[in-house]
Amino acid sequence: MDVPLRRMVAALGEPLAEVAVAPDGLDVPLTGLAIVDPEDPPDRHPGQLALVVGARGRDAAAVVRGLAGSGAAAVAVKAAEAGDALRAAATEARVALLVVRPEVRWERLESLARDVLDAGAAPDESGDLFSLAQTVALLTGGIVSIEDTASRVLAYSRSDDDAAQVDELRRRSILGRQGPEEYLRMLREWGVFDRLRAGEDVVRIDEHAELGIRRRLAVGIHAGARPLGTIWVQEGAGPFADRAADVLVGAARVAAGHLVRRRSQAPAAHSRRDLVAGLLDGRVSPGLVAGASGLDEHTSALVVAFAVRTGEAAAHELGVAELGDVVSVHAAGYRRGALTASIGARVYAVLPDAPRRPDPALTALCTEVVATARRRTGVRVQAGIGSAAAGLAGVPGSRGEADRVLDAMGDADVAAFGDLRAELLLTCTLALLAEHPDLRDPGVAALVAYDREHRTDLVGSVVAWLDAMGDVRVAAERLTVHPNTLRYRVRRAAAVGGLRLRDRGRLVHHLQLLAAVRTDNTDGPSSSV
């Protein structure tokens, strides 16, 4: 699957490579990777990223032109800096040029670049380890790397903004060279590696200024009892976020899924998310999702829906894909088997073993996602929580409730279906009335027509009186009119529309009047009558 150059650059970044020239922008697609030695026979490289291993600096200018002619979309060359000759060659040939630091090992760059290409483009999904590392960096306030059990770096967060804070251990690890042996020996003596292999406990490692090593947090990645790797977070310019340890636990669970799929050559993460999206839509069998995710088909589950309110900011960094990463980490911290997917402009978390009512931990999860979005970009995110279903087959129903909560929750940041049950049922009832004109009360229609003709607000006055359960003083205060004025309006409305306000007709009229106010926009200016 093609990957845009922009994504490759965002994944690799400092301290490996930087873009020197991009004549056609960063959205050109990369179809694959090629290792090119100038001594090799000419070959075709359509749409590929070509790593030039046999020439450096200005000496590679002719190779760059030749690779552009062979169809390469981008060329990577080692150089201390991009000189004029190299830039001119790439600009003239209209090929993107990446300048790789001289100390970077080609096999390290190749391995990381292939990981990005293998993850696929998936513009609405962010299922690769690089994206996860960037999300963990956002949520912890640190600088992240994800390693396998042999301490090989699999992915890392970009550290451009914190480049001055990157210590020697991180730099050497990413470049593919072993960290300071004295420091690694101390980690072994302190039992750090043993603790990381043993379970999910987050390990804190103090700063060692004499070795140029900053403070760190680390957590092991596991599939059952089998260690798969480690997530390391180096302290950046400021202290770690308050809930950094909780974030790491969730991130390790998400990373475990990526690494297991990588080892088994199972479908990519976005394919799994397609299954989850199908479960939310009711298109995919609950049994199929349960088998693919290791869940019990009959476990209780509820859905939380998150929506980015883009109307509050014309430009923002936290799009649906980024929100999906944040939600997946927090959801995995709340429930190990949590599933996430995005549909349209919303991100959904399916939480197994769900409580019958939202517990404080679930509310905290939603609140933290909302706060992260606000703190990071100023963009507002809202969370709607559906009711718990008896099994995965009930997930579409819980999703529908979560969607309705988002649509009806107003200014709240987090709300559950149980909090808005009355409002949601009323909304559904009024929608049914609006869809069936034959059920409309002719008396209410006459009252609406009277208000339009005489520019009065008898409809609004009666609705306020009914909302106040017939308490004239409360309703008059809400309308800022005298109680006698309101009494007159109610009597007048009853006469105009022939309304029955003292028996069961009162409920029917109340619903019909509310439907008229909401669908016909009859809420006009109050009159003095």
Image (cartoon, rainbow, N blue to C red):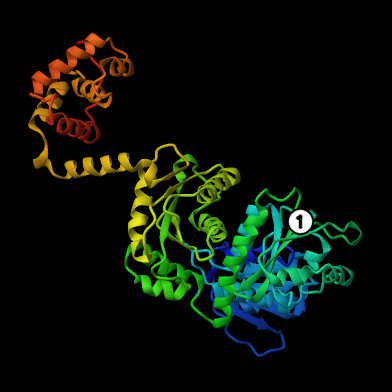
- Residue 519 placement: quadrant: top left
Residue that lies at the very extreme toward the front in this rendered image? 356
Is residue 408 placed above or below 172 in the rendered structure? above
10 or 490: nearer the eye? 490
Query: The disc labelled 1 sits on which kind of residue?
Result: Ala
Question: Residue 516 vs residue 500: left or right?
Answer: right
- Residue 112 placement: quadrant: bottom right
Residue under the point 25% across and 26% down: 523
Residue under the point 18% across and 15% down: 489
Quadrant position of the C terminus in the picture: top left
At which x and y percent is residue 99?
A: 72, 68
Residue under the point 19% across and 24% down: 459
Is residue 423 placed above or below 107 in the rendered structure? above
Question: Residue 260 vs residue 112: left or right?
Answer: left
Examine the rendering and report whether any part of residue 23 can be seen: no
483 or 210: nearer the eye? 483
Residue under the point 66% across and 77% down: 111
The residue carrying pointer 1 sits among few (fewer than 14), some (14 to 19) or many (20 or more) residues within 10 Å by Cα, namely some
- Residue 89 placement: quadrant: bottom right
At which x and y percent is residue 414?
A: 46, 44
Element marked by disc 1: helix
Number of labelled discs? Answer: 1
375 or 369: nearer the eye? 369
At which x and y percent is residue 75?
A: 65, 73
Question: Residue 223 vs residue 181: left or right?
Answer: left
**Dot 1 corresponds to which residue?**
163
Residue that lies at the very extreme toward the right in this rendered image? 210
Examine the rendering and report whether any part of residue 212 can be seen: yes
Is residue 527 placed above or below 303 in the rendered structure? above
At which x and y percent is residue 53?
A: 73, 80
